[in-house]
Image: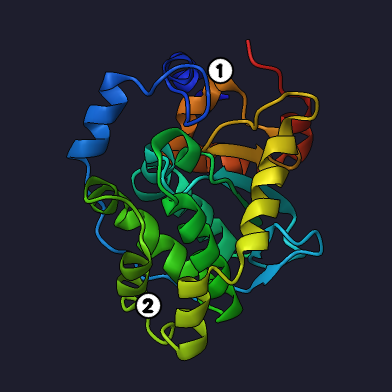
Amino acid sequence: MTAVAAMGVLGLMLTGCGQQAPVSAQAAEQQENKIRPYAAVEQLPEQLAADGTTIVVGDSAAPTKVRVYEDPRCPVVEEFESLGGAPALQEMTVDRETRTEYTFASFRDDRLGGDGSKRAVNALRAALEAGKFVEYHEVLFQNQIEVESSGGFTTSTLLELADEVSGLRSDSFDQAVKTMKYENFVKASQEAYDNANGDEPLGPGTPTVVINDKQVPQEIFGLLFEEDLFEKLLRSVHQAPAWWKAYQPT
């Protein structure tokens, strides 16, 4: 496949948060130099799955399933969300071609100090309760770099960013953010992330993308950060799921 072949080398240079190698200097420079304006987010169906940790966005009957593992403080996730393949995924989710499932980790707090990831995951769960997860999720990642440079996600920052989502702020949302109402969800989500690799002691790293229960392998990891190529991959899987099931990196 052309998209896979084109990005095979790049996939070897990039890794996510929680994986062995750091992001390449080239990728970091691209992240700083590319700017994506705020996108209009169309309202999508969103719900908490029966497992209690997966947030599902889009038509539950969509034929292609994409699971994304994210830590709100991970700069590589920010690159995927703001500069990479996430907009293509969102477009296909709006068109009911895919459904997107999120599992949120918070391991960056343990490595960097503070509790910003945990507070952000709690706030995202509160936004889901208000029916505003999609919009708030986009706002958090579009502001992540600035927030992290000034000390990370705090209660006040999370509430200020919520002002950018029409209809999100309310007494119930504000109290949920202030009191860490969904702390059990935060812990359970981290456990789900930790267990995603089966017998492996750590989670798969963030971002990790799993399409139709098959993880995008490290050899083509770079596809996640090129919107056009990631869209080609998603559409190839959508049109020929058997191809993806049989695909083996070379």
At label 1, which amino acid type do we have? Glu
Q: Amino acid at mark 2?
A: Val
Residue drawn at point x = 32 percent, y = 51 percent: 152
- Give the vertical position of 175 relative to 72 (above or below): below
Asked if disc 2 and disc 1 are in contact, CB closer than 8 Å, the reply is no
Dot 1 alpha-carbon crowd within 10 angstroms: few under 14, some 14 to 19, many 20 or more: many
Residue 109 image offset from top left, x and y in percent: 46, 42
Q: In front here: 117 or 37?
A: 117
Q: Residue at x 40, y 47 (%)?
A: 114
Q: Which mark is residue 219?
A: 1
Residue situated furthest left in the rendering: 33
Front label number (2 vs 1): 2
Which quadrant would the C terminus be assigned to in this image? top right
Please name whichever residue, 131 or 92, is drawn nearer the observer in this view of the structure. 131
Residue 184 seen from this side: yes
Residue 177: percent from left, percent from top: 47, 72
Q: Is residue 239 above or below residue 186?
A: above
Instruction: Report the residue marked by disc 2.
Output: 165
> Which of the pair 82/2 is nearer the observer?
82
Rate crowding at label 2 as few (under 14), some (14 to 19) or many (20 or more) other CA atoms within 10 Å: some
Q: Residue at x 74, y 42 (%)?
A: 212
> Considering the image in quadrants, where does the N terminus appear?
top right
User: Residue 125, position in %: x, y?
Assistant: 58, 67
Q: Position of residue 104 (x, y in %)?
A: 58, 50
The residue lying at 67 percent from left, 61 percent from top is 184
Q: Quadrant of residue 83?
A: top left
Secondary structure type for disc 2:
loop
